[in-house]
Amino acid sequence: MKKLKEILNRIDGKGYKAYKDLKGKYEFLDYTLAIDHVQGDPFATPSKIRLIIPRKSTNVNEDSFSNKRRKVAIEDHLTRLVAEAISKNEKKAHGTGKSGLVSIDTPGQEVLERTAVEVTFKSITVCLSVGLPARGRTVLGKQASKMLVDQLADVLNHSVFSINEQRAEEVLKLNDQQTYIRSFLKENGMVAFIANGAILPRESGISSKPLDANKAIPFNAPKELEISIRIPHQTDPIKGMAIRRGITLIVGGGYHGKSTLLKAIEHGVYDHIMGDGREYVITDSNAMKIRAEDGRQVTRVNISPFIQNLPYGKDTKAFSTENASGSTSQAANILESLEVGTSCLLIDEDTSATNFMIRDERMQTLVSKEKEPITPFVDKVRQLYDDLGVSTVLVMGGSGDYFETADCVIMMENYLPYNVTEKAKEISHQAKSHRKQEGGKHFGDLSERVPLTESLDSLKGRKSKVAAKGLDTILYGKAEISLQYVEQLVDSSQTRAIAEILHGMERDNLLNDGLSLKELMQKVEKILDDEGLASFTVYKNQHPGDLARPRFLEIMAALNRLRTLRIEK
Ligand code: ADP
Ligand code: MG
């Protein structure tokens, strides 16, 4: 600390570049400050620092990181505590540009593996961004000292050094329960669980916070679909609706809550914080939302299970386009997900291409199969399950053609679910549909694509340039990847991580070994599991503080949307 103050005294009043002298480590009474990166001017990306605290001097016990999932939960909790302490801190320094700013990569409603805080047996590391204070381009040494010494100590005192053990325990208990439900689903042939009392609707279309409790109708399972799970840390079993493997149809009138239910299921691949309303909505972690995405590029995907005989003999076994249609993009989204091993498709009619989902009897009569390249999803959904073991949860209020193949039909009425499976089966027997099954008896072959090394080229001019912009965009060399329609990507720190991972894959030549996309994703998962989320970055042992873990399915989605993707023929 003395050393830090000495430097600050010396550079006070000098040009901003003098701050570079701060790089290094400083010992404080109960923690270490590491200044890893110093910004070039007051307007540049803030400086990166770490606070390293011996774990023994905090209330974090070994129990709280006894397994990987608990570790993620306690780290997430600490990140939130630090964020809270920063927002309440009033000792802020002021000045030009980002002077005086202190921030941590703050989580949203999900509990994701992050790099902002790391807990190990020895220490707790907190990664922060700080704006070193200046007036114009002049170093404000005293303000800097106030910030780096007093303010940071204050933030730690109100977070890491004053953990409320009871609150932390509750976070860990919830995490254990979520983990338990996840494995229960897996062992019992289920793809999702929605607890009674869950609040599914969100505050607005742009907020993931829960809708006001006075306005929301809590979820309540129909008796026939209700299950009880004996979860840890509470005597009464938790009850709710199970969605089993196979084909589940969600029907009901417009505005009765179908999409809201599906959205909650989509997000159930992640754990949510207490108070979110979806903390006990749990979905198979490998479930993939599928939608139409016209305009996206597609690179040599075998979409022939759905699409054949395109005009002018365009190949659909290795289908490429710079500008896919609604139906071809939806087919590509499905086949790419199957290629890397998704277990369950989640589809909403609102975001599907109609001609991809249905083709009724009358249309079959008017336009013969020879003239229609598309085999609709309704003819493939059963084979998906029977041949490949992949389940589907489908919102479909507009067509009864799915009644025959559905294993379970749930009707949403006034935001509550009812089991109408029997009724739907009865109707399909009485009013027989005369539509013909199309597209053969089997699902068909999946792609097994091998991406070529040249696919990842981060050079822009003479420099390597990769950057994430917000939640939806990654700039990769000269290419721009749009993830706008990859709907289970929820946090811009995940987007940043995907950018880092792709860049790391290029640097480490991961595409040189002729691995298939699936093998590649397995390899990336293993590296992330074994070496941590920061392992693809260049600042491995320093400051990777703003990354959150994406699923391999979203990494795959980004790679597939890279217009420079090249596939071995
Ligand atoms: P659908 O897909 O059946 O047309 P949505 O799921 O889009 O209907 O829901 C319509 C509206 O109702 C949305 O504004 C949504 O936020 C709201 N809503 C959905 N479920 C609930 C609920 N359980 N309680 C209160 N409002 C809800
Ligand atoms: Mg809808």
Image: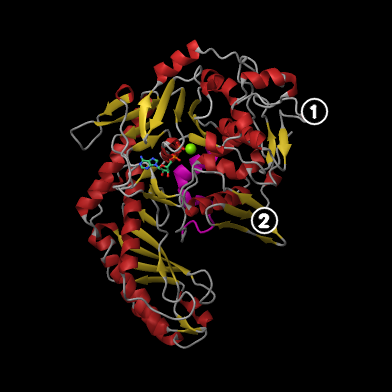
Residue drawn at x 32%, y 26% is 222
* Residue 28 appears anywhere in the view: no
Residue 367, magenta (yes or no): no
* Residue lying furthest right: 312
Q: Nearer the viewer, residue 337 or 51?
A: 337
- Placement of 266 over or under 432, stated as above or below: below
- Amino acid type at image mark 2: Gly
Q: Which residue is mark 2?
A: 477
Whether residue 469 is visible = yes
| Magenta span contains residue 540 | yes
Tell me which amino acid carries mark 1. Answer: Gly
Residue furthest out toward the left: 235
Quarter of the rendering containing residue 380: top right
Q: Which quadrant is the N terminus positioned in?
A: bottom left
Give coordinates of residue 15: x percent, y percent. 52, 85
Q: Position of residue 497 (x, y in %)?
A: 51, 51
User: Residue extending furthest bottom?
Assistant: 13
Q: CA distance from mark 2 to mark 1?
A: 34 Å
The C terminus - image quarter: top right
The secondary element bearing badge 1 is classed as helix
Left or right of residue 466: residue 278: left
Residue in the picture at 50% in, 16% down: 404
Query: Which stretch is magenta?
Result: 522-541
Mark 1 is surrounded, within 10 Å at the Cα level, by few (under 14), some (14 to 19) or many (20 or more) other residues, namely few
Q: Which residue is mark 1?
A: 313
Q: Of label 2 and label 1, which has the lower sequence position?
A: 1
Pointer 2 local density, CA inside 10 Å: few below 14, some 14–19, many at least 20: some
Please tell me whether mark 2 or mark 1 is closer to you in this view: 1
